[in-house]
Image (cartoon, rainbow, N blue to C red):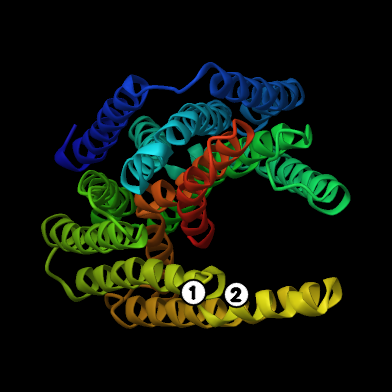
Amino acid sequence: MDIQQILPIGAGIASFIVALGIVTWITKQPSGTKEMMEISNAVKVGAAAFLRREMKIIIPIAITLSIIIGYFIGFSNGLAFAVGATLSAVAGLISLKITVKAAVRAAHLSGSGLGKTFAMAFRGGATVGLAVPAMALLAITGLYMIYPDPITIAGVGIGASLIALFIRIGGGIFTKAADMGADLVGKVEANIPEDDPRNPATIADNVGDNVGDAAGMGSDVYESYIVTILASLLIAALIGAPQIFMYPILIGTSGMIASIIGIVIVRSKNITDVMKPLNVSFYVSATIAIILNFIFTYYFIGQTTIAYALFGTTVIGVILVPVIQKITDRYTNYKYKPVKDIVESAKWGYASLTLMGIIKGMQSTGPFMIALIVAIILSFSIASNAAPEGTDPVLYGIFGTSLTAMAMLSLAGIVLSIDAFGPIADNAGGIVEMTGMGEENRKVTDEIDAVGNTL
């Protein structure tokens, strides 16, 4: 085993160790009153029942497909399919368990101010952000070490996609249906506040946050990570240059290390704006990822023109992450004009509100599309123009674009940490409302939830 194989395994293990430490800290925090625990347990039971019902359908299908793939395509692909599917389900389960555990504790801490509540919500999300990409990195590294030809482990992507499809879409439909049902019954028909304990649909709404926004998101990110790194490995194999075979995995390693550092530096004392520590964490992670990508490129790929060109494509991917985050924030943050326009349109009734929401949603796709097209063109051009003489520049161009995507997803740890604390804050707000903890407590959870909705 050489250093290029040790690095990703070490990064994955380190990520799990940090995640375990955070889980231990979360578990030691007080879980609140008996009434709060009753609500939390009801949400946990509902979410577990939903996943259990899904798994009764998914598991027989996954086992059957694994056997078929193994028989007709090869044992390695059948095994890879089983690994991909199993860990995708585990990713969803981890996300679900941590979200439920952290939410009730965040609700309890809401009486202690914004800082402590934010710390609990973020660290709950950080556990998911550390564990899920680590599983993906370790899985693909382990399979690649056993079967060095990536085409023989392509089944890992299919397996991950199968489970993510069920959990993400099934959970997503559930959460939207439960959310709309709760709002229609409570706000429209009964004219009572959101998450009011008199509305039985609020439990289903909170269950939806867990199975859709938490479990679904965990499986989805795991699947995206797996298929992106697998695509890069396949293209590297087509090029046939041995020095770049492990490069996509090294990109994932740098992002993993950067995410760990970005997570542990987040501080919650004396904060008045939740976005500030998150932005600091985000930019620190991105900077460290770029530095590590350069170091890995310099020492493992070489000091050639193509090596520096491939590094350049990873820089584009890392930069693209904050660009996408800023665009998202612009169109979903209540401080900016798009959301204010939607709020203003509500004065004229349901029709104008709906139309304005659709208009702003469609408008938001424009900047995303431009950013992605620019990134694709730049990465392809840089890599293809630097292709060594006698090689296929198109293949190198495609490889460069795949590295841009891989570099973007390498920061999945910090992105998922920030993203996952949204459902935790949302659930915490529901518990605060249902237990009648007071308006000040609800303001704290709503402020954190509002930030979670923009990321």
Does the image show residue 184?
Answer: yes
Left or right, residue 204 beside residue 384: right
Q: Is residue 149 above or below residue 404?
A: above
* Image coords of residue 99 (percent x, y): 50, 33
Which part of the image, by quadrant, shows the N terminus?
top left
Direction from residue 278 to residue 56 in the image, left or right? right
Residue 450 at what x, y percent from top left? 51, 58
Q: In front: 149, or 331?
A: 331
In the picture as drawn, the residue positioned furthest to the top comes out as 34
Q: Quadrant of residue 427?
A: top right
| Amino acid type of the residue tagged 2 in the rendering | Val
Q: Are marks 2 and 1 in contact (CB under 8 Å)?
A: yes
Inspect the image, locate mark 1, and give the three-letter code of the amino acid beneath it.
Lys
Query: Which residue has dot 1 on it?
Result: 335
Question: What is the spatial separation of the Cα atoms under label 2 and label 1, in whole angstroms?
Answer: 7 Å
- Residue located at (38% from left, 76% from top): 379
Instruction: In the rendered structure, find residue 203 and report the number of the disc placed on it.
Output: none
- Residue closer to the observer: 51 or 100: 100
Q: Residue at x 47, y 55 (%)?
A: 447
- The residue that mark 2 highlights is 339
Measured as percent of width and height from the top left, residue 43 is found at 64, 26
Q: Residues within 10 Å of mark 1 (few under 14, many from 20)?
A: few
Taking the spot 28% from the left edge, 55% from the top edge, the residue there is 271
Q: Is residue 140 visible?
A: no
Residue drawn at 20 percent across, 40 percent down: 7
Q: From the top left corner, tell me how far across and down residue 417 is, in percent.
A: 39, 46
